[in-house]
Amino acid sequence: MTNIEIGNRIKYARNLRKSTLDDVAKKVGVTKSTIQRYEAGKITTIKLPVVEAIAIALNVNPAWVVGKSDIMELPSQKIPKIMQYYKQLNGIGKETATEHVRLLTLDAKYTKPDNVISIVKEPEPDYLAPNAAHERTDKEFTEEERLEDDSMLD
C-alpha cells in the first residue's frame, strides 16, 4: 500500500470521526503538520508506532490503516477513559499516575469484587518519617538562649 493510500485512510477516518488535525496530533503527541504530511502521503518512511497511535486516536483498526485488513472498525474495543487521560500526560505525569494506580492495587477494596471491602495499610515512605532536631554540640549556648529557643516551640 502506498503512502498516499495510507494518508487517504487516515484522512477518511479523521473526517468520519469529525476530528481536526489538531485533535489527532494532540492525542498522538506529534505536531499538526506531521498528521497533515501523513495524510498527504509526504512522509516516505512510515513509522508504524505513529501510524498505530493515529489509528488508536481515531479508534480504527491499525491494520486497516496500513492496508493489511479490510475491517476498519475495532471490534467494540473502546479505549478506556483512563488511557485517554494518561496519553495527555508528560513523563512526570505518567510516572505519578502509574504510582497512584500501583498503590490502588495494594488495597483489596480496589481489586476484589465490589461487595468485598478491605483496607490494606502500606508502610509510610521514609521521607514522611519524623526528622527530629537534636541539640547542637558544635557551640555552647547560654541558659538565656536555651529558654528563648524553648519559648519558640510553645
Image: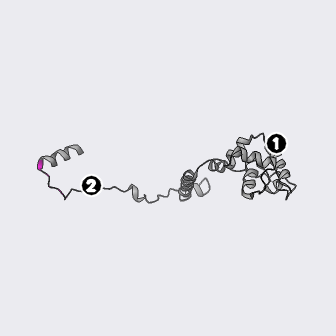
**Residue 28 placement, left or right of 104:** right
Q: Quadrant of residue 127?
A: bottom left
Nearer the observer, 26 or 94: 26
Nearer the observer, 126 or 123: 126
Local crowd at mark 1 within 10 Å, few (<14), some, or many (≥20)?
Answer: few
**Residue beneath the point at 72% across and 57% down:** 49
Asked whether residue 116 is in view, the answer is: no
Quarter of the picture holding the N terminus = bottom right
Give whichever of discs 1 and 2 has the lower sequence position: 1
**Residue 51 placement, left or right of 144:** right
User: Quick one: which residue is furthest to the right in this view?
Assistant: 70
Asked whether residue 21 is in view, the answer is: yes
Report the predominant secondary structure element of the magenta stretch: loop
Task: Tell me whether the residue at label 1 lies in contact with that at label 2, contact meaning CB atoms closer than 8 angstroms.
Answer: no
Quarter of the picture holding the C terminus = top left
Say what secondary structure mark 2 lies in.
Answer: loop
**Residue beneath the point at 47% across and 59% down:** 122
Question: How far from the left and from the top, in percent, is residue 58?
Answer: 76, 47
**Residue beneath the point at 75% across and 54% down:** 51
Q: How many marks?
A: 2
Question: How far from the left and from the top, in percent, is residue 38?
Answer: 77, 49
Q: CA distance from mark 1 to mark 2?
A: 65 Å
Q: Which residue is mark 1?
A: 16
Is residue 142 a member of the stretch shown in magenta?
yes
- What mark, if any, has residue 113 been given in the picture? none
Question: How far from the left and from the top, in percent, is residue 48?
Answer: 75, 58
Q: Quadrant of residue 104?
A: bottom right
Residue type pointed to by label 2 = Ala
Q: Which residue is mark 2?
A: 133
Nearer the observer, 132 or 93: 93
Residue type pointed to by label 1 = Leu
Q: Which residues are magenta?
A: 135-143
